[in-house]
Image (tube, helix red, strand yellow):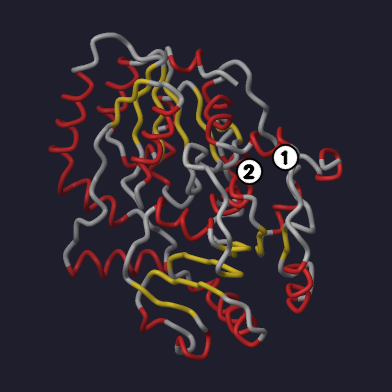
Amino acid sequence: MTHTDLGEKSIIIYIPDHVGLPDMFRENLQSLGLTVWPLVTPNPKNRISVKDTIIHNFRKIFKRDWTYKNKVFAKNRQHDIIQTNIRILNKIRVKTDYALIIRPDLLDDDVIKKVKNTTSKIIGYQWDGLDRFPAVYDKIRFFDQFFVFDKKDIAVDKRCKPITNFYFDHLFGQEEIPNTDVYFIGSYVESRMQTLTDLAVFFKDNNFIADINIIGNPKKQILPPTATGINHSAEIIDFKKNYQHIKKTKAVLDLIDDAHTGLSLRVFETIGFKKKLITNNPEVTKYDFYNPNNIFVIGERNIEDIEGFMQIPFEELPKDIHRKYGFENWLRNILDTPEYITINEQKANDNNN
């Protein structure tokens, strides 16, 4: 496929500065030929006070409110961030074709209004769930189209449209020989730690080469690493480094966060890299890429069956389905450009022939 129609376009992007995401978006957009105007985002390495940290943790644990820390950051740096983004937007002499704002709850209203006046089409995407960051509800009104990845959010706000996550497709090249059986990386989430620990012990007892990593406070671990094989680390692994790990494993482990039920980026990365998937998210069975020889759903099969599952070779997906969940097609869907494959949920047996 040629990228001529995209190569003639320009886009403003706003993406949270998390594990290298802005660079990944910018590089993938530029690889498609778009002129990219990235906006500035708050630096996640900025620290808040001890008092604010205690308040944030209390609200997160007992009220399931993850927004306090972002509000503190916004208050501390709001003026500088706003002025920097206004200066960037003032440099754009001709309206861009598109603007894509991910996590609009992090962006000031004045900047969103300025973006809207600087582009022909403004699109929002909330990929962390609406209720998790409720400040987003008041932002939806600014957008020409607004997308969510968790289908339950569509029932909450009718202005939202469904879209899946995707895999970045500009870094895919020659496949590598795996040196691990299972790979997992994720932040510490209390609700999934017992499942992760049980799986890690199973992998260890059955001589799987597992690379399992939890980013967070090691004091929260359920069992010591020597018993589970779980690595606890404070180091953040960015997307490019993470992709190198995925390229060198046979299967990726994905465990859902109770805050949402949509499919994570990890699921789509296994499509891109042609890796097996072990997950406890039953929603995956509703999609056209589902194949029980490639995807093991915990809870629907016994954990002991993973051994047999891993012995079955990965079955290639049809080319259209593989391309369907890549970044380019995802982008074409939300921009409504020509030559895209519509992303929706379909039963696997309708498309896996």
Tag 1: amino acid: Glu
Which label belongs to residue 151?
2
Say which residue label 1 marks. 345
Q: Residues within 10 Å of mark 2 (few under 14, many from 20)?
A: some
Which label belongs to residue 147?
none
Tag 2: amino acid: Lys
The secondary structure type at the circle numbered 1 is loop
Residue 74 position, x and y percent, is: 22, 46
Q: Residue at x 49, y 44 (%)?
A: 127
In the image: residue 296, left or right of residue 55: right
In the image: residue 243, left or right of residue 350: left
Residue 243 position, x and y percent, is: 47, 53
Q: Residue at x 55, y 68 (%)?
A: 179
Q: Residue at x 66, y 59 (%)?
A: 277
The residue lying toward the viewer, choosing from 285 and 106, is 285
Q: CA distance from mark 1 to mark 2?
A: 10 Å
* Mark positioned earlier in the residue sequence (1 or 2): 2
Residue 2 position, x and y percent, is: 56, 18
- Is the N terminus in the top left, top right, bottom left or bottom right quadrant? top right
Disc 1 to disc 2: CB gap under 8 Å: yes
The secondary structure type at the circle numbered 2 is loop
Q: Is residue 267 above or below residue 254?
A: above
